[in-house]
Amino acid sequence: MVNHKSGDLEKGVVRTERFEMEYFRFGEGKRTMVILPGLSVQSVMDSANAVEHEYREMEADFTVYVFDRRKALPRSYPVDEMARDTAEAMACLGLERVCLFGASQGGMMALRITLDHPEMVEMLALGSTCARVEERQFRELEHWASLARKGDGSALYEAFGKAIYPPAFMKKYGKAMLSLGALVKKEDLERFIILIEGTEGFDVSDSLVQIKCPVLVIGARDDVVLGPDTSQKIAEALKENGNCELFLYDGYGHAAFDTAPDYRTRLHRFFCNCSAPSAF
C-alpha cells in the first residue's frame, strides 16, 4: 500500500496479486465509514477534496474511506466482481464492522458485499439504488454508453446530467458540465463503458431477506434513472429485518446524494443510532 497525506486527507493504493485500487480517507473518528460512489465518467479520486468537504460533519465520529473502482479494468467487469474486489481491498486495510454507504451502482456493490461478507458490515445505507437491474433501467445506462462509444463527451455529460440531476441544478451548472465533457479523456470514456456494461444482469433481489444489519434506504420520487419504486422494493424485501428505514426525497433527482442539503446529516444520524426505528 502507498499513502500520500495532504492536510486531513490521505490518498492510498491497495495492491493485491490481482489488482490495484485507489482510495482516500479522512476523519479521525473511532468508527469506520466506507463510501462506494456511483457511476462517474472520471475517477472519484479527482473529487477527493470536494467529497471530504461535503462529509466533514462525519469526521469527529468516523474515519471515512472512499474507494474507487480498480485500476486497469478487465474488459468484462460485472458489479459482483466490483464488489468482490472492493471487499478484498477493505480486508487488506483491516476494515471490519464498517458503516457502509453505497450510492447508485455503489449501492449495488454494497448490497453484494453485505450479502457475501455480513461480518464486515455493521450498518448499511443505500442511496438511489436497486437490487435488480431491469431492462428498462439498463436502456438508460446503455444510452450513456453509446454516447461514450462515439467519443462525444459533451453530449454524454449533458445526457448524464439531465438524467441524474433536477432541472434547477442543470440550469445552474449545465454549462460547466458541458465544458468538462469537452475535456474528458478517451481512457475515461472506455472505463465508463465497461462500468456501465457491468450493471447488466445484476440481481440480488431474492437474497435481500438474508441481510440482518440495520439498513437505511434513501431514494427519490423523481428518480428517472432507476425509478422511485426500486428503493421501495428493497425496503419491502427487508421488512422482516425489523430495523430498516425508508426515506424518499422530492425534487432532488437520482443524485439526491449530491443535491439534497440534508443528505449527509441524515446518514450521520442513522449511523450514530444503532437502534434506528423500523419504517414499517
Image (cartoon, grey):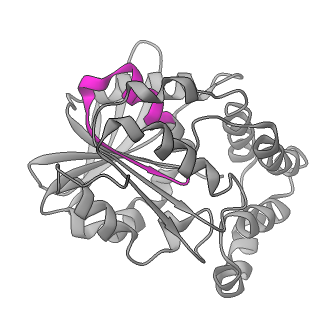
In the picture, residue 67 is in which quadrant? top left
Residue at 65% across / 81% down in the picture?
173
Q: List the single residue furthest toward the front.
A: 280
Question: What percent of the width, then of the height, locates residue 239?
Answer: 41, 41
Residue at 67% across / 34% down in the picture?
199
Q: Using residue 226 as the reference point, say whether residue 16 is left or right of it.
A: left
Question: What percent of the width, then of the height, locates residue 180?
Answer: 69, 68
Q: Nearer the viewer, residue 186 or 30?
A: 30
Q: Nearer the viewer, residue 36 or 188?
A: 36
In the picture, residue 197 is in which quadrant? top right
The relative height of residue 22 versus residue 57 in the rendered view (above or below) is above
Residue at 42% across / 38% down in the picture?
238
Q: List the single residue furthest toward the right.
A: 150
The relative height of residue 17 versus residue 1 in the rendered view (above or below) is above
Q: Using residue 141 as the reference point, say whether residue 236 is left or right of it.
A: left
Residue at 81% across / 37% down in the picture?
135
Question: What percent of the width, then of the height, locates residue 66?
Answer: 37, 47
The relative height of residue 26 versus residue 253 in the rendered view (above or below) is above
Q: Does any portion of residue 92 appear in the rendered image?
A: no
Q: Nearer the viewer, residue 154 or 94?
A: 94
Residue stretch rendered in magenta on the structure: 109-128
Q: Using residue 252 as the reference point, say whether residue 279 is left or right of it.
A: left
Q: Does any portion of residue 259 appear in the rendered image?
A: yes
Q: Quadrant of the N terminus?
A: top left
Would residue 78 be counted in the magenta stretch? no
Task: Tally the numbered discs.
Answer: 0
Q: Using residue 109 as the reference point, say whether residue 163 is left or right of it.
A: right
The relative height of residue 3 versus residue 114 in the rendered view (above or below) is below
Q: List the single residue furthest toward the left.
A: 30
